[in-house]
Amino acid sequence: MTVRQAFQRCSAWAQSLRDRRSDAVLRAEALAQAIENKDIQKMQVLLSPGLKTIFNNDIAALTPDAAFKTAFEKTGKLDATIFRKRYPYLYKNQKTTPISLAVITGFHEGVKLLVEKGAKIFEENPKVKSGYTGALGAAIFRGDAEMITLLMNHESVQNELNTKPAFRNYLLHTAASADNALSLQTIAACDADFMEKARAYDTMKASDFKLGTGISRKARTFGAG
């Protein structure tokens, strides 16, 4: 083997190493697995600022809100069977985000880390009746009081409550749809104006729903159709 050939082989190996280590899909798969397994150390590594490789190339940290989306875009043309085999954790969690997956999994430490790294707690979504989607809604639907409190006290949520009245309606509608009294109580504990200012099913206030023994069945009647 000539010196030139050896150099070319070494360069190709180095490039393949960089590609493997920086591959967005593989790292997103690893993040999904870490969240499901509640592996906070692995999450911290994957979400850390770029590290220098032995070739002095940065490995960019995963961005919480874009990690899964980018991976799905890159695997969009894959056959479903191949996708499921290569990336089982991403396959199971299509159409979700890392923070929503952490909420659904009940992984409190993971949610805190993702919030610290800039993950969005909610998003405006004109395609849905309530006007919003996101991790906060998932926490409310699950009735996880600790998770709801963590997210409700975040600056972005408090700003939304102060500037957009419709946001309270979204919170009430989500709790009522889940028929979850604990969620309703927890939201009210985090927002002094919630009980009287929020509206669901057009006219119902939060105070119209029963607390402690389950939400009134009237909610389902109002929500019909």
Image (cartoon, helix red, strand yellow):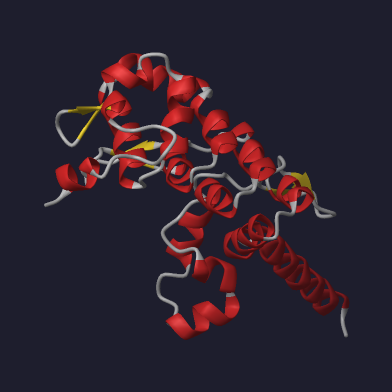
Residue at 57% across / 82% down in the picture?
A: 85
Note whether 91 is above or below 28 in the view shown: below
Q: Position of residue 169 (x, y in %)?
A: 27, 29
**Residue depicted at x 70% and y 60%:** 37
| Picture layout, residue 51 above or below residue 189 | below
Q: Position of residue 195 (x, y in %)?
A: 33, 21
Across and down, in percent, residue 17 comes to 75, 66
- Residue 137 appears in which quarter of the rendering? top left
Place of residue 92 in the rendered image (x, y in percent of width and height, measured from the top left) = 51, 69
Q: Is residue 56 left or right of residue 99?
A: right
Counting labels gives 0
Query: Which residue is pictured at 39% across the width and 41% down the height?
Result: 214
Please identify the residue farthest to the front as the structure is shown: 213
Q: Nearer the viewer, residue 225 or 61?
A: 225
Query: Which image quadrant: the N terminus?
Result: bottom right
The residue sitting at the left extreme is 225
Q: Nearer the viewer, residue 211 or 58?
A: 211
Left or right side of 20 for 96: left
Residue 164 located left or right of residue 190: left
In this rendering, position of residue 203 left or right of residue 26: left
Relative vertical location of residue 203 with respect to residue 35 in this rendering, above or below: above
